[in-house]
Amino acid sequence: MIFKKVKYDFVQNYSDNFQKQFISHYMLKNKVTELSTTGKLVIDLKEQTKEIETHIVSKLFQKKIITKQDLKLENIHNYIAKQNVKENSNNDVTRNKLTAVFFKKDKEFFKIYYKIIKKIKKKLKFKFLYQKDPFLRFNFPTNNKYDSLLPHVDLAIGHPPGEINLWMPITNTNKFNSFSISDIDKSLVFFGKFGFDFQYYIKKYNKKIWNDANNLLTPYVSKKGKTLIFDSRVMHKSLLNKSNKTRISLDFRILPIEYEKISVFYTGTGYKKQKFVRGKYYSKNIL
């Protein structure tokens, strides 16, 4: 891969006063780290993955994006028009027309999603709010050699401390098409060098920092359905897909209810400027 720095305009920019409050929130212990010293857990959601696979194929067939339904999703790039594979962002390899198809989801999808949430609840046991609208992403094989993808944590883009990330592979992943992730201790040390000031981080971001970050990251190689649950302070990034297999994943977040009182101070940096409160970004009801 060849290092490439682009404009990372999605990174939060807090005032000096709020930055101090942010750091105090940042250092609060996350519920996942209470359960795992690495800040990561895995849950097998094989049954729900099969349901999502079927739903994806059915939806794409209905929209006439594919003309056959007896295909493997990891090979879907061989059955769709080239314009559907094209990357539409310098800093997100999953921004393409197929990902956009699932920006609006139907009742059938949300039935499956709620089954997933209930399985997560059964494993974690504590009470939480969950992201209302999860993100389904398609990462297609690419010839792009320039890595402009920023190693980050979601707290760098406005998400509240205490949140928990979940990353669910809908296809099998390999070390060339997955996403890379570190662990909590390495991540705290790495971003601590920048004072947890993410504007300062992107200002200083260069090839050496890119190399340093990549040395702390490991591709998440797994069978489909093996869902990663991790502390939102754990560094991660997508990978340029240098394999011959499409990677499809579902990502979403939950918020343990004890962190709800601080989540109200935070707003997402995306175009929606999401408020991290009940009924907006999160579910109305506690699970």
Image (cartoon, rainbow, N blue to C red):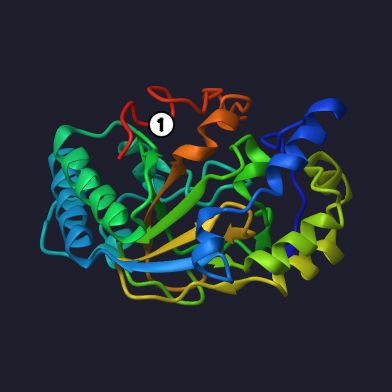
Q: Secondary structure at mark 1?
A: loop
Expressed as whole percent of the image width and height from the top left, the position of residue 110 reads 21, 39
Residue at the location (21% across, 53% down)?
Answer: 52
Q: Which residue is mark 1?
A: 282
Expressed as whole percent of the image width and height from the top left, the position of residue 193 reads 87, 57
Q: Relative to 243, is 107 on the left or the right? A: left
Q: Nearer the viewer, residue 128 or 197?
A: 128
Q: Relative to 1, is 256 on the left or the right? A: left
Expressed as whole percent of the image width and height from the top left, the position of residue 16 reads 87, 29
Whether residue 129 is visible, yes or no, is yes
What amino acid type should be assigned to the residue bearing mark 1?
Tyr
Quadrant placement of the N terminus: bottom right
Residue at the location (37% across, 22% down)?
Answer: 279
Q: Relative to 91, is 257 on the left or the right? A: left
Label 1 Cα crowd, 10 Å radius (few <14 / some 14-19 / many 20+)? many
Q: Is residue 139 above or below residue 281?
A: below
